Image (cartoon, grey):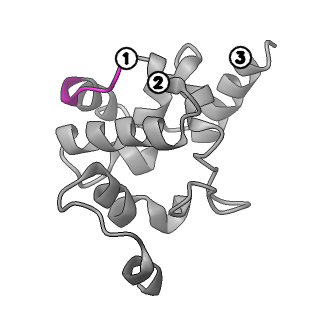
Amino acid sequence: MLALACAAPVAAASPELDYTLNCAGCHRPDGVGTPGSVPPLAGSVGRFATVPGGREYLARVPGVATSALDDASLAAVLNWMLDHFGDGARAVPPYTAEDVGRLRREPLVNVERARRELIEKMEGR
């Protein structure tokens, strides 16, 4: 709670606030993740978004697919994450509420395998 009190103020009902309230507890405010249990967003979310199947992966991971946020708010958070942690990945099409609604209906069952396969694509294997 102290971190939230000391953080820069954000607009009410903004994607940044939704990230802070729904994602930052595990992925951390700076997107570095939780070593050993939660992967970082900073330095990787943009790479995933640009690999075939990666954009879909980001919307289907369990924490995203099962979020209490509505589809439009969740799309805004995903777009904010790409802007904030994506290292120039905004060349990918922005998420829409329709994209998120369609993708989150099928959350990933084997996240580890899907992540590994995407990393192999990134590495050219």
101 horizontally vs 43: left or right: left
Residue 52, quarter of picture: top right
Instruction: Identify which amino acid the numbered label 1 is placed on.
Output: Pro
113 horizontally vs 71: left or right: right
Q: How far separated are the C-alphas under marks 3 and 1?
A: 20 Å
Which residue appears farthest toward the bottom when viewing the image?
A: 2
Q: Nearer the viewer, mark 2 or mark 1?
A: 1
Residue 38's disc is none
Q: Earlier in the sequence, mark 2 or mark 1?
A: 2
Q: Find numbered disc 2 in the image and state the secondary structure of the residue it sits on.
A: helix
Q: Nearer the viewer, mark 3 or mark 1?
A: 1
Dots 3, 2 in contact, CB < 8 A: no
Residue 30: horizontal and vertical position, in percent? 56, 58
Q: Which residue is mark 2?
A: 55
Foreground residue among 104 and 4: 4
Say how many tags the image has.
3
Q: Is residue 24 above or below residue 46?
A: below
Q: Which residue is mark 3?
A: 121
Q: Which residue is mark 1?
A: 93
Residue 93: horizontal and vertical position, in percent? 37, 17
Residue 80: horizontal and vertical position, in percent? 37, 41
Dots 2, 1 in contact, CB < 8 A: yes
Q: Please check the rendered image and state whether residue 41 is part of the magenta-colored stretch, yes or no.
A: no
Position of the C terminus, as image quadrant, is top right
Residue 69: horizontal and vertical position, in percent? 23, 51
Q: Is residue 82 above or below residue 40?
A: above
Highlighted range, magenta: 93-98
Q: Is residue 41 above or below residue 34?
A: above
Q: How far separated are the C-alphas under marks 2 and 1?
A: 9 Å
Q: How far separated are the C-alphas under marks 3 and 2?
A: 13 Å
Q: Find numbered disc 3 in the image and state the secondary structure of the residue it sits on.
A: helix
Q: Find numbered disc 1 in the image and state the secondary structure of the residue it sits on.
A: loop
